[in-house]
Structures are given as C-alpha cells and as structure tokens.
Amino acid sequence: MADINPRRKSKTKPSATTTTTTTTTTSDDGRHDGFPDECDAQVWASFDQTFRQVQSVLDRNRVLIQQVNENHQSRIPSNMVDNVALIQELNGNISKVVSMYSDFSSDFSSGFNNHKSRNGKRGSSNPDA
C-alpha cells in the first residue's frame, strides 16, 4: 500500500510524472467563470488565516496528547491529576476547531453564493449554464 502522508519522505522515486492542466472558460460577456480567478484576495487571505489558526490548535492538541500519554505511562499520581486539566484543554481545543470549521464553511458558502449571484447563475443546476 502506498504511503500518502505528505510529511513523510518517500524512499522510492516516482515512476511517472503527472501533469495537471487547469482551464478557465469565459462567458459571452468576457467574464471568467472560474471561481478562484474571481475571488477577492481578501477572501483567500481570510481562508488562509483560518487554516493557519486551525493548524495551530491542532499542533497544540498533538503536544497535549503526547503529554497525556507520557503522564499516563508514568503512573505517578500527580501526573494523573495533571491529565485532568490537559484533557479539559484538549476538549476545549476540539470545540474551537469545530467552531472554526463551521465558521469557515459558512463564509465559504456565502462567498461562493455571492460569486454565483454576481455572475447571474444563482439557482442554476446545470454546471454548463
């Protein structure tokens, strides 16, 4: 089974090269139909900031989980007591991540719907319309 984790270094060289081509079509009035070309840079910056915040919380969670595991393996009573606070922080962080993704989803949907309405395509179920 191939390792798909992007953080791990592959020990084997790829046997083939894949090229991806992206095309953007224009409508009759000359506007681009491609969402990324139309989005405001501020929107993309906001998305980037959200992903960075989420990643920061997830990185903190990784550290918390490692600490909880070390404390648990030590079997020292004071470390077990410390785990209560660590697990509470972890639980709070998970709630933060859920909230961030929920906000991101709403913002993305709003931005996408605003883009569609600017192009007069709201409610169209035909992707070629």
Image (cartoon, rainbow, N blue to C red):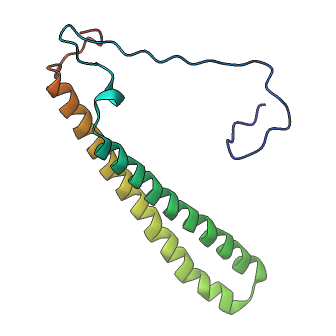
Q: How many marks?
A: 0
Q: Is residue 9 above or below residue 67?
A: above
Which residue occupies the foreground of this view, 90 or 5?
A: 5
On screen, residue 86 versus residue 95, left or right, reads right
Q: Residue at x 20, y 26 (%)?
A: 116
Q: Residue at x 70, y 72 (%)?
A: 69
| Residue 123 placement (x, y as % from top left) | 17, 21
The quarter in which the C terminus is drawn is: top left
Q: Residue at x 44, y 52 (%)?
A: 51
User: Residue lying farthest bottom?
Assistant: 78
Which residue occupies the foreground of this view, 70 or 7?
A: 7
Q: Residue at x 53, y 82 (%)?
A: 85
Which residue occupies the foreground of this view, 125 or 27?
A: 27
| Residue 97 placement (x, y as % from top left) | 43, 58
Which residue occupies the foreground of this view, 47 or 97?
A: 47
Please tell me in which quadrant of the rendered image residue 111 appears: top left
| Residue 24 placement (x, y as % from top left) | 37, 16
The quarter in which the N terminus is drawn is: top right
Q: Is residue 98 above or below residue 67?
A: above
User: Residue lying farthest front?
Assistant: 30
Q: Is residue 17 above or below residue 109?
A: above
Q: Is residue 91 above or below residue 27?
A: below
On screen, residue 72 versus residue 29, left or right, reads right
| Residue 109 placement (x, y as % from top left) | 27, 38
User: Residue lying farthest right?
Assistant: 11
